[in-house]
């Protein structure tokens, strides 16, 4: 029992240890030292726990189970995870844990699994159907028997873990009361107990941001702050009236199976960033660049200033962004990557494109007929026109016109999926096709699919291509 | 001796085996993937891959033009009389039986419904080609076609015969590219008669799958010398329109027109000119044609196109039943042209060149100047 608790604690402590990613548990193979400086290098730690090596890929997630299995005689007998749970290839491949292992015996089925090898039953009791009564399923030890010698170490670990939890909980309470200074102290104390703990360090960073809520070059709008990262949910670029909304960090499924070049659907991590609440307007562009390249302007469009700027190329966007970065302290403005764009457009929703709902959120060919209706019998792109930004409903994160109105340039090169921001597709130097997203006022509803990628040459200008600004979030 | 190996041994042995098996099979597998099938025969009909797409077109396509004799209304209106429509439906059904899998509908106002009705039961086998029509906006036009046909296999815009792509063409192109990405269209292309426009389209139009352009033995002599190599290198599909030079090749061979008298045809052609033609040229053609006892000049002309491996498909307009059979039977021979056929084609070319634009039908005489340029 003591060994089991010890293993459990070790696993929990390591699960919150520094640099731990979702698949980074394979270093979690030794007990943490009292003093962090005494910790052994990870290779030695792995050697000290050979069961992690033997368990292979299972050890990446099932740390506790592997630790339990590690104390059993099954290790020496080469009875590994697959022996009882089957090859479970689907479970291994599915990172989101949507596929179960091939075999997951519970209750009386556990004994049947044991009989597969121990066909004579228990050597002591000769029982064949109550194995789990005296044997832990993984560790095989009798949970009712105590093992001498581990009590002292266990007590120390328990005390340390308890102190960490106490500080973390106190910190959380202070956060609830908006006592950021006190909360900061609690999280710092928690980190002293388990240095580098991801949970505590994230909360500490959040407290620091709340204590000093300054975004260079921006005014904070409203009083809403993101609970996880402590940044203001909405800001305004000072002197340029460009409203930006915080897009929280997260994971999402990029792509769509029904679109040829959006396959395969794969999971992508996105850091927090600010994204324009609206598409960049003609007035904003003109204020920066002194010219207005848009087709839809003049007497026919009295609200042109509030309409999205269009007829701009990717190269034009880069020139404008360069100028904006020179003028606004802190800079950091850019086009969103295509992964960021799709993440923001989906706004944590997995629901497929709903054409009826689209009417409420987007301007597209179905509802953007030019007003007043022309008498011309022929149709051309002039038959439809963009509308002032923000005249439809926003998405769940408060972003307007993500679909429709004008297509939005992204920074990314058009390359096949899988998306990897580090493979050179976000380079600004090379020549090649750049991606447009979102569809436009003359597009059909199908072309407004959040996953639809539209590559275009960076120098091309069309009456329906515009942009939306993005800005990276700087560290605490 | 142990009857079980350890997990480590098992992994080592199995990975070695897998590596050995992989090395043996990987190279051919990669080679197959790198070079997809470009052409194959199926029940006598030759099929070729359209550029880089996954579409395989029969080398004989069914052109869109309808018989003017049966047109119900004004010019360019393809609504046919009941009798005319029945004839066309019968021809189309026969074409499908022969293995033709491409049907074009240039004139959307009258032929979409009949074609959709015929194609619907065999939609997976038959490819529908559609051309952008004014005055409807291209996006709207695609939506209408996709609604009727389920999807469009080949969609093209007629870019005119200018010298370069215009802003309007680029905007239309942007819309049809997006329609392709949204799955409404499977391949996108252009049609033009101008080589300069073709060269411009190759350079300017992103994702161009195919070009439809006039290609026949008379106008392929030295033309397209710049455009064709570039198109072939880019892997763009090439579809021949007017493979029989707007029907004028039929006029040169009496055998291709049952019931006509050979001498009358030639004399008529001869007499239409203000300037006298050399009777020697007519005699040369007659002599050459006589060397082709079991073949018409049209068949030789079609085989001229079929035999070019870079040409995906030839799409003549066919009004008569025997025209379809004639164009199909050209495929049943060995594709490479024989000496007698080459001589006949040369003689016909010479005659066409000497007779100026008048060898073409009145509505297509402008082409002569275009092609000669």
Image (tube, grey):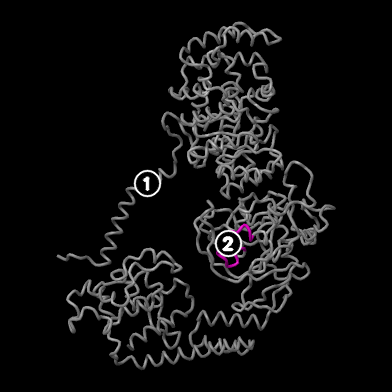
- Element carrying mark 1: helix
Q: Which mark is residue A339?
A: 2
Q: Is residue B201 magenta?
A: no
Q: Name the subunit of mark 2.
A: A
Please say whether residue A354 is one of the residues in the magenta stretch: yes
Rendered location of residue B222, percent (x, y): 59, 24
A394 up-or-down from A464: above or below = below
The quadrant in which the C terminus of chain A is found is bottom right
Taking the spot 53% from the left edge, 27% from the top edge, the residue there is B91
Q: CA distance from mark 1 to mark 2?
A: 35 Å
Q: Which residue is mark 1?
A: B27
Out of B219 and B264, give the one closest to the viewer: B264
Q: In the image shown, does A237 or B45 lie closer to the viewer?
A: B45
| Residue B111, disc | none
Mark 2: secondary structure: helix
Please say whether residue B201 is visible from this viewpoint: no
Residue shown at 52% from the left, 22% from the top: B321
- In the picture shown, does residue A28 fall above or below A147? above
Disc 2 crowd rating (10 Å Cα; few below 14, some 14-19, many 20+) is many
Residue A409 placement (x, y as % from top left): 66, 56
Q: Are marks 1 and 2 in contact (CB under 8 Å)?
A: no
Counting from the top left corner in percent of width and height, residue A394 is at 68, 66
Q: Quadrant of residue A53?
A: bottom left
Of all residues, the one furthest to the right in this rendering is A299
Q: Which residues are magenta?
A: A345-357
């Amino acid at each position: 029992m003591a060994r089991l608790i010890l293993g459990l604690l070790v696993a929990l402590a390591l699960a919150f240890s520094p640099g731990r990613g979702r698949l980074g548990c394979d270093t979690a193979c030794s007990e943490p030292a009292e003093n962090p400086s005494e910790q052994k290098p990870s290779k030695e730690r792995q050697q000290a726990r050979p069961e992690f090596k033997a368990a292979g890929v299972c050890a990446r997630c099932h740390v506790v189970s592997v630790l339990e299995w590690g104390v059993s005689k099954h290790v020496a007998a080469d009875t590994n995870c697959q022996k009882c749970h089957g090859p479970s290839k689907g479970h291994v491949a599915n990172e989101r844990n949507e596929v179960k292992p091939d075999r997951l015996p519970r209750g009386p089925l556990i004994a049947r699994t044991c009989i597969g090898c121990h066909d004579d039953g228990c050597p002591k009791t000769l029982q064949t159907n109550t194995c789990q009564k005296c044997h832990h399923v993984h560790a095989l030890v009798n949970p009712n028997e105590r093992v001498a010698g581990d009590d002292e170490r266990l007590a120390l670990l328990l005390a340390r873990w308890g102190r960490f939890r106490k500080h973390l909980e106190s910190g959380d309470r202070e956060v609830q009361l908006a006592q950021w200074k006190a909360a900061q102290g609690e999280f710092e104390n928690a980190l002293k107990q388990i240095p580098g703990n991801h949970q505590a360090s994230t909360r500490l960073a959040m407290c620091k941001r709340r204590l000093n809520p300054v975004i260079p070059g921006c005014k904070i709008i409203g009083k809403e702050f993101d609970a996880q990262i402590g940044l203001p949910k909405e800001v305004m670029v000072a002197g340029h009236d460009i409203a930006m909304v915080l897009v929280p960090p997260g994971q999402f499924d990029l792509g769509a199976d029904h679109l040829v070049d959006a396959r395969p659907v794969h999971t992508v991590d996105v850091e927090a960033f600010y994204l324009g609440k609206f598409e960049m307007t003609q007035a904003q562009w003109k204020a920066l660049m002194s010219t207005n390249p848009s087709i839809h302007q003049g007497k026919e469009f009295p609200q042109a200033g509030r309409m999205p700027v269009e007829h701009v190329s990717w190269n034009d966007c880069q020139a404008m962004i360069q100028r904006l970065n020179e003028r606004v302290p802190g800079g950091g403005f850019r086009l969103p990557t295509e992964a960021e764009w799709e993440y923001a457009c989906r706004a944590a929703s997995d629901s497929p494109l709903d054409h009826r709902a689209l009417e409420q959120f987007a301007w597209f060919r179905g509802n953007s007929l030019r007003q007043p209706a022309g008498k011309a019998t022929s149709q051309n792109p002039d038959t439809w026109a963009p509308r002032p930004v923000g005249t439809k409903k926003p998405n769940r994160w408060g972003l307007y016109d993500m679909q429709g109105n004008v297509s939005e340039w992204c920074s990314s090169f058009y390359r096949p999926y899988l998306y990897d921001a580090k493979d050179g597709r976000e380079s600004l130097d090379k020549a090649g096709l750049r991606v447009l997203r979102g569809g436009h006022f003359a597009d059909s509803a199908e072309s407004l699919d959040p996953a639809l990628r539209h590559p275009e040459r960076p120098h091309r200008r069309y009456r329906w291509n515009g942009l939306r600004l993005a800005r990276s979030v700087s560290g605490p | 001796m142990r009857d079980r190996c350890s997990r480590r041994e098992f992994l080592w042995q199995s990975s070695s085996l897998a590596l050995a098996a992989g090395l043996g099979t990987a190279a051919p597998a990669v080679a197959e993937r790198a070079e997809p099938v470009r052409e194959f025969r199926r029940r006598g009909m030759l099929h070729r891959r359209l550029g880089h797409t996954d579409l395989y077109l029969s080398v004989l396509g069914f052109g869109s033009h309808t018989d003017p004799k049966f047109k119900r209304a004004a010019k360019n209106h393809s609504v046919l009389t009941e009798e005319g429509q029945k004839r066309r439906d019968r021809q189309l059904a026969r074409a499908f039986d022969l293995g033709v899998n491409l049907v074009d509908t240039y004139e959307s106002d009258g032929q979409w419904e009949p074609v959709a009705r015929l194609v619907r039961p065999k939609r997976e086998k038959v490819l529908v080609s559609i051309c952008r029509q004014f005055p409807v906006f291209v996006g709207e036009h695609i939506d209408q076609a996709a609604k009727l046909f389920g999807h469009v296999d080949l969609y093209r815009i007629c870019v005119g015969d200018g010298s370069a792509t215009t802003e309007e063409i680029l905007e239309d192109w942007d819309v049809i590219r997006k329609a392709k990405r949204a799955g409404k269209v499977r391949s996108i292309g252009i049609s033009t008669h101008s080589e300069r426009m073709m060269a411009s389209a190759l350079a300017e139009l992103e994702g161009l799958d195919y070009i439809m352009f006039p290609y026949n033995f008379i106008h392929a002599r030295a033309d397209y010398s710049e455009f064709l190599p570039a198109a072939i290198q880019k892997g763009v599909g090439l579809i021949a329109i007017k493979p029989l030079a707007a029907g004028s090749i039929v006029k040169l061979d009496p055998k291709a027109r049952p019931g006509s008298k050979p001498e009358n045809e030639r004399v008529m052609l001869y007499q239409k000119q203000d300037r006298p033609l050399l009777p020697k040229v007519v005699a040369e053609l007659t002599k050459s044609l006589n060397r082709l006892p079991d073949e018409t000049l049209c068949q030789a002309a079609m085989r001229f196109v079929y035999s070019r491996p870079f040409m995906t498909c030839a799409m003549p307009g066919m009004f008569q039943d025997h025209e379809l059979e004639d164009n199909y039977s050209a495929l049943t021979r060995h594709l490479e042209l024989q000496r007698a056929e080459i001589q006949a084609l040369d003689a016909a070319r010479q005659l066409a060149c000497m007779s100026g634009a008048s060898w073409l039908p009145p509505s297509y005489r402008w082409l002569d100047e275009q092609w000669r340029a």
